[in-house]
Image (spheres, helix red, strand yellow):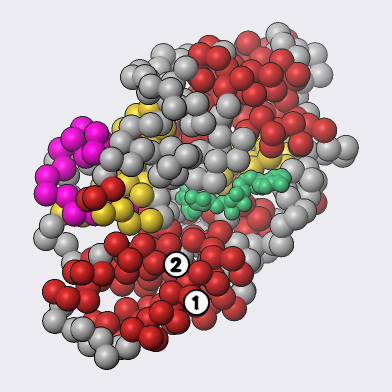
Amino acid sequence: MKNKREGKVIFSPYERGDAVKKVVAISREDVLFELRESILKGRGGAGFPTATKWTLVSAAISDEKFVVCNADEGEPGTFKDRILLLEYPELIFDGMVVAGYTIGAKKGIVYLRGEYEYMLKSLEDYLGEMRKDNLLGENICGKIGFNFDITIRLGSGAYVCGEETALIESLEGNRGEARNRPPYPVNTGYLGKPTTVNNVETFAAVSHIITKGGSWFAKFGTDKSTGAKLFSVSGDCEKPGVYELPWGTTINELLEIVGAKNTKAVQVGGASGICIPKSQFNRKLGYEDAATGGSIIIFNESRNMLHILKNFMEFFVEESCGQCTPCRIGNVKLLEGIEMIENNNYTFSYLNHLKELGKTMQVASKCGLGQSSPNAFLSILENFKDEIFNNGGNNGK
Ligand code: NAI
């Protein structure tokens, strides 16, 4: 692993239109080359290589293609996209224009989290400014035939609509439920047309990559996790907020930066992530170790891990769309298991069955919601079993 380097990537200097002006002077292949050089991986959490995704959409044969920005940031403990939307819209929108140019789309859509409705007017005003500057519209920046525009659509508060195919269903006016994949949106996306769905932060990273070069971006972070990442840090620390840190930063280093004391556990990846105990705080944030879309929730010694887990599972029971059985029933069963522990009315043999159920949900659920909702259950019961089963005074039967 290469030594991580300090420095700002997303928060480095950038002027509106920088990437757009640059992109119209180069070819699609040049854009894809820079993306490959950057080794940028999707910032929503899954880390799929952006160059691969855009190459696939670019190669798909269709009369129409779409660029979709997933701004349905709904993971508990995640608020980094909010900062980008409020303070750095130029990075997001310019990145979408670059995507439109690269894949050959005329239309971009931002799917904005319902709870972020208060931003809608200022974002739409911003798009109006871009149109005046010919950064959107027809023959963008004088490039004859390059026409692209962006609209914003509001979600209505369903967590599952952050999953890309449920998001597309919602955009089409249907109930937000995940589709089977494959086919992936790169071939069959919005209105059945090839679509690139990328996270807000991914578009922001693209704007810098086009302006400063893929190899510049790849200097930050580690070999497998290039660039820097925005982290939403909340919980028991003196300085919660959004931080940009190079991939490869350890959990210990992050805790020091944000002034966390007496930390017992760190939830990496929000409610759907894994709960890491103190003995593993030397782990590195990055795709090769502790991968995350950027949510970090810190718990100090005063916290009750079973209460935390119950809180997460209540969230998933509420947010499961109910379409597939492993997720609809599984989350309820895991929550019941937690309540059995609370009431000292459990057997280890039954809890072992629930752990198996959690593992089944990870592979059998239809979408990322049910595939990741057991993560907290499995990691907290494993990493904090001493606290949960001994200190609570209930030793199972
Ligand atoms: P995934 O790994 O299945 O897919 C990631 C992306 O790569 C998608 O855009 C998908 O279309 C594309 N892709 C994957 N394989 C492909 C292939 N063979 N051909 C073409 N395209 C392909 O992950 P998924 O289910 O889309 O997302 C799960 C992630 O979402 C989790 O890792 C979690 O971290 C994250 N998440 C983020 C939240 C947030 O608020 N940012 C909330 C909840 C989960």
**Residue plotted at (43% across, 42% down):** 289
Position above or below: 359 against 154: below
State the residue position of label 1: 357
Tell me which numbered mark, 1 or 2, is placed earlier along the sequence: 1
Circle 2: is it few (<14), some (14-19), or many (20+) Cα within 10 Å? many
Q: Secondary structure at mark 2?
A: helix
Position above or below: 346 against 279: below
Circle 1: is it few (<14), some (14-19), or many (20+) Cα within 10 Å? some
Ligand 1 within 8 Å of disc 2? The answer is: no
- Residue 32 lies in the magenta stretch: no
Question: Where residue 276 sits in the image (x, y, percent)?
Answer: 31, 53
Cβ–Cβ below 8 Å for labels 1 and 2? yes
Which amino acid, mark 2? Pro
Label drawn at residue 93: none
Pick whichever, 161 or 49, lies toward us: 49
Question: Where residue 314 sits in the image (x, y, percent)?
Answer: 37, 72
Question: Where residue 31 sits in the image (x, y, percent)?
Answer: 68, 19
Q: Secondary structure at mark 1?
A: helix
Position above or below: 363 against 238: below
State the residue position of label 2: 374
Question: Where residue 247 sits in the image (x, y, percent)?
Answer: 40, 31
Find residue 375 and report its image quarter. bottom left
Residue 137 in the figure: left or right of residue 214: right
**Which image quarter is the C terminus in?**
bottom left
The stretch of residues the image draws in magenta is 251-267
